[in-house]
Amino acid sequence: MTVAERKNHDKGVFIDVSAAAQRLSGVVNETPLSLNTTYSELFGAIVLLKREDLQTVRSYKIRGSYNKISALMERDTKLNHVVCASAGNHAQGVADTAKKRQVKATIFMPVTTPKQKIEQVNMFGDQWVDVKLIGDTFDQSNDAAMAFAQRQQLRFIHPFDDPEVIAGQATIGLEILKQHNEPIDYLFVPVGGGGLAAGMVSVFSQLSPETKIIGVEPSGAASMGLAIERGRPTALAQLDRFVDGAAVCQVGQHSFELCQSGLTDVLTVDDGLVCQTILNLYNKDAIVVEPAGALSLAGLQQYQEQIKGKHVVCILSGSNNDITRIEEIREKALLYHGLKHYFLVRFPQRAGALKSFVADILGANDDITYFQYQKKHNRESGLAVVGIELKSESDFEPLMDKMKAQGFFSDYLNHQPELFSLLM
């Protein structure tokens, strides 16, 4: 083939990237592919970042939504109303497309969606969008959107499980190969529903088949890994929504069919490592990314031996991060590195007990960051929940030993999810 198109004859998935590139020409930004010195030095590789965080609507999602809606309008000149469901980036992509193509869009979002994201959708779509807040979760909102589209006989714009949406996302691959003249050894791609990863497979399988494509999922939403293990898209029994841009209960059929044969590997990464990556990018490179946007870079740690001396591309998929999440992100990063610990501490019911705890138990660099005390338990002692931040992970065992030796220790909470979640 001379263009980046792929036909999977066994599965019948056709991805027309060439047509998508023509539709998106002059509409989306050709985002930079930039060398990142920090991560290149850290891993001894040439690490390049594809900056979709700098895309219009601050994520790659505009590519798929614009290509899909434009293709529909080419086939149906009377199309004037579409429907979608999203908790964030897809909604913004559809809203921006609706305004550009002057098509009404009814966008369903969960009631729990942060106000900032709702305002962004209304800003990008202006008078062309109607936001409906229905359901406590994305799945409930999505069900309502699909039912509405069916009742009104309107076209539903899927966030990932659609060949034309995948083709729009695939144009990122064309840009990467145009921007980098040397062979790309590894491409790390964030995976949620699989639309972006499927798009990369579509392009690289034809134009750079030697490139190893590594999908990276959050450990609490590893739906692609489960699908590949089972041989079919399978709904997760539980879903952690922290990495909200990639928190998908079940990958799409189309994206699965492409990724099953095209991905070299699918990794899962801990939320804490994702959070540390967000902080690293902000503190060292002044780059703002959302949790899903940091997934690809977080995946490098598991491939640190394989990528030494190699040309590596990581896609930063978006920067729609709510500033109110920063403290939670910092907390998760500290927990991941073993620098933040929560305890139930037993304080003797006597004057000076807290002073003794600070002077005799805490190390010189330890810091109390959370303290909640109730003097109600019995005459001899009272329990307090205490959060302690350490400067070094090695300070944990001496702290624990001193607490036990002097009778302050009651329980350790970090490994008790139900209790610990009340503090986070």
Image: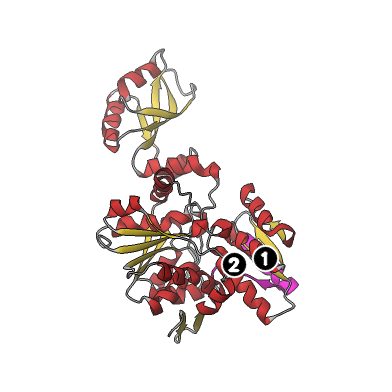
Give yes or no for residue 145 being in the magenta stretch: yes
- Residue 308: which quarter of the image? bottom left
Looking at the picture, tell me which residue is in the foreground, 153 or 317. 317
Q: Position of residue 58 (x, y in %)?
A: 55, 56
Q: How far, Cα to Cα, is label 1 from label 2?
A: 9 Å
Query: Which mark, residue 27?
Result: 2
Q: Determine if residue 232 is in view.
A: no
Query: Which mark, residue 100?
Result: 1
Is 141 placed above or below 157 here? above
Is 416 placed above or below 11 here? above
Q: Amino acid at mark 1?
A: Lys
Q: Is the C-beta separation of discs 1 and 2 under 8 Å?
A: yes
Image check: 270 left or right of 144? left
Identify the magenta region.
140-160
Q: Position of residue 271 (x, y in %)?
A: 42, 50
Give yes or no for residue 62 being in the magenta stretch: no
Image check: 224 left or right of 409? right
Looking at the picture, tell me which residue is in the foreground, 39 or 385. 39
Give the residue displayed 52% in from the left and 55% down from the top.
244
Q: Amino acid at mark 2?
A: Val
